[in-house]
Amino acid sequence: MAYTADKPEPPEPPDQLRARIPGWGVDLDPRDRPSVPKERFAPETTGAHWDFPERQPGYETRERSIEHAFVTPVFGTTAPLKGLSGVVRRHAYRRYSEGRAAHWLLLIGADRIDVAESRVRALMQGRPDNPVTESGIRSEITAHGGASRRRSSRADVNHQWLDPFVSGAPWIAAAGLGAAVVVRRKGRSRK
């Protein structure tokens, strides 16, 4: 079992594994292993007073990889899942292995959804994002941003021309959508 002091026994005896898998067990002899002096099992020196750590409360509702039987005894709780992004994250953990690209693509998509949800939530609460100060545009002008790029070998210089499009496109799209809504409402009110 994971997280215990006992080393798990292999599912098959070493001789069967050696016969079935070429090269299995080549590092069993301590003389062939460079890490042997560092490998020491001495739990009394660590101060651990348990065989299996006490479980942190709330593990029943946490997402976990399908490769693991249970959530680790200690886990982070700083960002609880919420909204549509939480639904997408739960689906990624429930359905796909961590070794599949779909798992990670869903998690990346959930991050993008979370950003959109946060922006909408901030707008609804009356404190929308400020694209000028929060994107660093002002510091690019006042702190000699362009000059620092011309005289350096920074890796981001090659794609810096894309930055205004990537950072500004959502704001331009939102402004265009807002203008279209205003024009449409004015057109309806004139009829």
Image (cartoon, rainbow, N blue to C red):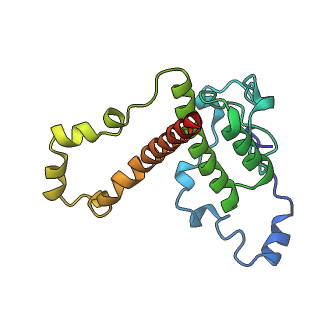
Instruction: Tell me: residue 21, above or below residue 90.
Output: below
Question: Residue 78: x, y in percent?
Answer: 59, 27
Image quadrant where residue 88 sits: top right
Q: Is residue 124 left or right of residue 130?
A: right
Question: Residue 48: x, y in percent?
Answer: 65, 27
Instruction: Tell me: residue 183, above or below residue 38.
Output: above
Q: Is residue 44 left or right of residue 138?
A: right
Q: Extreme front residue here? A: 191
Residue positioned 58% across, 67% down in the render: 32
Instruction: Tell me: residue 31, above or below residue 111.
Output: below
State the quadrant of the C terminus.
top right
The front one of 140 and 72 is 140
Residue positioned 86% across, 63% down in the render: 12
The front one of 133 and 22 is 133
The front one of 157 and 176 is 176
Residue positioned 32% across, 61% down in the render: 159
Question: Residue 21: x, y in percent?
Answer: 77, 75
Question: Residue 177: x, y in percent?
Answer: 51, 44
**In this orientation, does residue 99 appear?**
no
The front one of 126 and 144 is 126
Image quadrant where residue 85 sits: top right
Residue positioned 16% across, 37% down in the render: 142
State the quadrant of the N terminus.
top right
Q: Is residue 121 left or right of residue 49?
A: left
